[in-house]
Image (spheres, grey):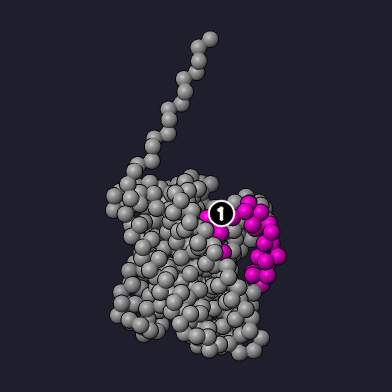
């Protein structure tokens, strides 16, 4: 009896520095940047020591720059790697978080170096618009099952709501971004709710549901910047309702145990805390809750970031998130 031939072996992963840097490193870095901006808001509203926010932002900025260099080594070797990253959900989320982290970096630089902040914001906006185009092309040319609306759509298509955080202090009237992104978020929320009713997402992907908290929180922050009190309060209330729903489902959402997708918990937590501080000015019960939320975010975000980056350092993160190889 003849034996069946063995399948060909998988090709070995190419060797070289940073050939498989996974985009999954960027969501927790975005969370750290948001945490630093949250502490900066707490300095204004609660009288927190200014050094906390600056320390977190400084460390997160250095980490972001290092990770950017590590990831950019891939498209510099082989530009086609960008399209490959966008074909998988962790890659798409990571790429969006990468450009949004640059937007947050610009916001962090505004009071320190406005000219540099403007340059970083310009690069981030161009990068984000390019990312939108690439994602749309991927959705249109990819398989039909890949066109399902996911929470990651918020990062890609509602992410511009972060632009006013630095654009307004730099003298640009970016209120149109707020009104343009609200209907997009509403559509994503509505479609996602229908999908959630019709089909239970697999356990490994459930942490991505936390991203739904981010747009409502950011609408509250940006509306506060423009002194749109009613919209800011309504957005904060919606964010609180989403958070309550997420907390009530926490055991179900985390049923698969820790994974790199837990990075999706980080930036929404920071945004929610900042939203409460922004709409309340640090006063009253909402201000107290904002302080509590900020402390909770501080206890949660760095450990998640550490574990994700530790997996990268050990060499397992790329394979676990299907990162493209240059």
Residue 39's place in the image compared with 315, above or below, is below
- Residue at mark 1: 259
**Residue at the extreme top of the image, as rendered:** 1
What residue sits 58% from the left and 67% below the top?
A: 300
Q: Is residue 46 left or right of residue 121?
A: right
What residue sits 44% from the left and 54% below the top?
A: 313
Magenta-colored span: 241-266
Determine the main secondary structure of the stretch shown in magenta.
helix
What residue sits 59% from the left and 76% below the top?
A: 295
Residue 289 spot, x, y in % from top left: 64, 81
Residue 246 spot, x, y in % from top left: 65, 65
Q: Is residue 215 left or right of residue 252?
A: left
Residue 176 spot, x, y in % from top left: 44, 77
Of residues 176 and 112, the one drawn nearer to the viewer in this rendering:
112
Place residue 274 in its image quadrant: bottom right
> Does the magenta run of residues contain 285?
no
Is residue 94 at least partly visible in the picture? no
Of residues 138 and 74, the one drawn nearer to the viewer in this rendering:
74
Helix, strand or loop at label 1? It is loop
Residue 24 spot, x, y in % from top left: 47, 56
Q: Residues within 10 Å of mark 1 (few under 14, many from 20)?
A: some
Place residue 242 in its image quadrant: bottom right
Is residue 34 at least partly visible in the picture? yes
Place residue 265 in its image quadrant: bottom right
């Amino acid at each position: 009896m003849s034996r069946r031939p063995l399948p060909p072996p998988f090709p070995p992963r190419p060797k070289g520095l940073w050939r498989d840097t996974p985009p999954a490193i960027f969501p927790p870095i975005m969370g750290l940047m948001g945490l630093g901006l949250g502490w900066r808001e707490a300095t204004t509203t609660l009288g927190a020591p200014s050094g906390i926010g600056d320390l977190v932002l400084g460390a997160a900025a250095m980490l972001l720059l290092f990770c950017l260099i590590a990831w950019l080594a891939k498209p510099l070797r082989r530009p086609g790697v960008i399209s490959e990253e966008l074909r998988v959900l962790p890659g798409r989320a990571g790429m969006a978080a990468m450009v949004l982290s640059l937007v947050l970096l610009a916001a962090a630089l505004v009071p320190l170096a406005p000219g540099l902040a403007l340059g970083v914001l310009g690069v981030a906006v161009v990068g984000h618009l390019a990312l939108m185009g690439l994602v749309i092309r991927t959705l249109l040319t990819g398989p039909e099952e890949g066109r399902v609306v996911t929470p990651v759509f918020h990062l890609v298509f509602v992410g511009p709501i972060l632009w006013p955080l630095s654009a307004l202090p730099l003298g640009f009237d970016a209120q149109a971004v707020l009104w343009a992104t609200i209907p997009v978020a509403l559509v994503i929320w509505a479609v996602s709710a229908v999908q959630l009713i019709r089909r239970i997402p697999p356990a490994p992907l459930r942490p991505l549901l936390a991203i739904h908290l981010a747009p409502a929180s950011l609408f509250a922050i940006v509306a506060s910047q423009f002194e749109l009190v009613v919209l800011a309060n309504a957005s904060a209330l919606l964010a609180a309702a989403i958070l309550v729903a997420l907390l009530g489902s926490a055991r179900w959402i985390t049923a698969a145990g820790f994974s790199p997708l837990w990075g999706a918990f980080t930036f929404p937590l920071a945004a929610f805390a900042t939203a409460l501080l922004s709409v309340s000015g640090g006063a009253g019960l909402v201000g107290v809750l904002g302080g509590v939320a900020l402390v909770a975010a501080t206890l949660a975000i760095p450990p998640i970031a550490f574990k994700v980056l530790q997996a990268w350092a050990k060499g397992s993160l790329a394979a676990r998130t299907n990162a493209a190889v240059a």
